[in-house]
Image (cartoon, rainbow, N blue to C red):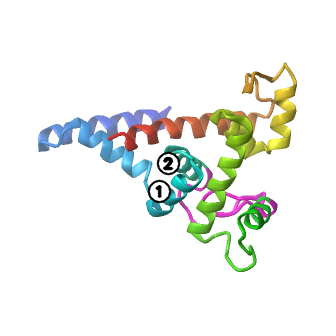
């Protein structure tokens, strides 16, 4: 509760400062958004968005959610890089793409974004709904197929109930970040 009050006070102070300095509220809003939702590695995001047909806002949302743009991030499950690729997934997709996974580090930003975007495209080809893709990115595509086959969890390719709380939270977080990135990129 104290953090929420502190954030509100800071937000009000920033708006007052913006108005007093002639800096518009809209400019302040986008400045805060850009600080919290960066467009880092844009040359790679642009390149592989076009190559694999994955929207830029999706790529940025996954990077933001997975690593917060820390290129050498590593999870407790050993997922690595900007898009937090699991070793087996990384090796499989590298081979699929004709890349020797031993010659390029998963932490290399371009390689990680390329392989992560390739994986998003692969999942989208299977599921055709971004929220389902996000669930598969987090929980695995085999698990999501099982959920979709069970009417308790899925219907017509949509997940109506995600049984893993971590995956449900992940889908919401990526979807929320995607909405913000759609707004930023639409400017």
The answer to whether residue 54 is left or right of residue 138 is left
- Name which quarter of the figure residue 99 lies in: bottom right
Element at badge 1? Answer: helix
The answer to whether residue 158 is left or right of residue 61 is right
Is 30 rendered above or below residue 108? above
Q: Dot 1 surroundings within 10 Å: few (below 14), some, or many (20 or more)?
A: some
Tell me the quadrant of the picture where the C terminus can be found.
top left
> Which residue is drawn at the image coordinates 44% and 59% (left, top)?
42
Q: Determine which of the numbered discs, if any, sits on residue 46 in the image.
A: 1
User: Residue 38's x, y, as percent?
Assistant: 43, 53
> Which residue is drawn at the image coordinates 85% and 19% (left, top)?
151
Specify whether residue 79 is painted magenta: yes
Answer yes or no: do the residues labelled 1 and 2 have beta carbons within 8 Å? yes
Is 76 rendered above or below residue 110? above
Task: Give the extent of the magenta segment.
Answer: 66-88
Viewer-closest of 92 and 166: 92
């Amino acid at each position: 509760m104290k953090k929420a009050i502190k954030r509100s006070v800071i937000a009000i102070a920033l708006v007052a400062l913006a108005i007093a300095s002639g800096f518009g509220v809209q400019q302040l809003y986008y400045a805060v958004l850009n600080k919290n939702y960066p467009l880092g590695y844009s040359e790679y995001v642009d390149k592989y968005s076009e190559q694999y047909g994955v929207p830029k806002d999706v790529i940025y949302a996954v990077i933001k959610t997975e690593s917060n743009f820390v290129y050498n991030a590593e999870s407790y499950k050993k997922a690595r890089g900007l898009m937090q690729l699991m070793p087996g997934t990384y090796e499989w997709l590298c081979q699929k793409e004709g890349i020797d996974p031993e010659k390029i580090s998963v932490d290399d930003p371009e390689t990680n974004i390329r392989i992560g975007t390739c994986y998003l495209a692969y999942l989208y080809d299977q599921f055709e709904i971004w929220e389902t893709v996000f669930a598969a990115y987090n929980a695995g595509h085999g698990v999501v197929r099982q959920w979709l086959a069970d009417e308790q969890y899925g219907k017509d390719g949509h997940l109506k109930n995600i049984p893993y709380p971590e995956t449900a939270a992940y889908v919401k977080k990526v979807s929320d970040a995607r909405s913000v990135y759609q707004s930023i990129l639409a400017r």
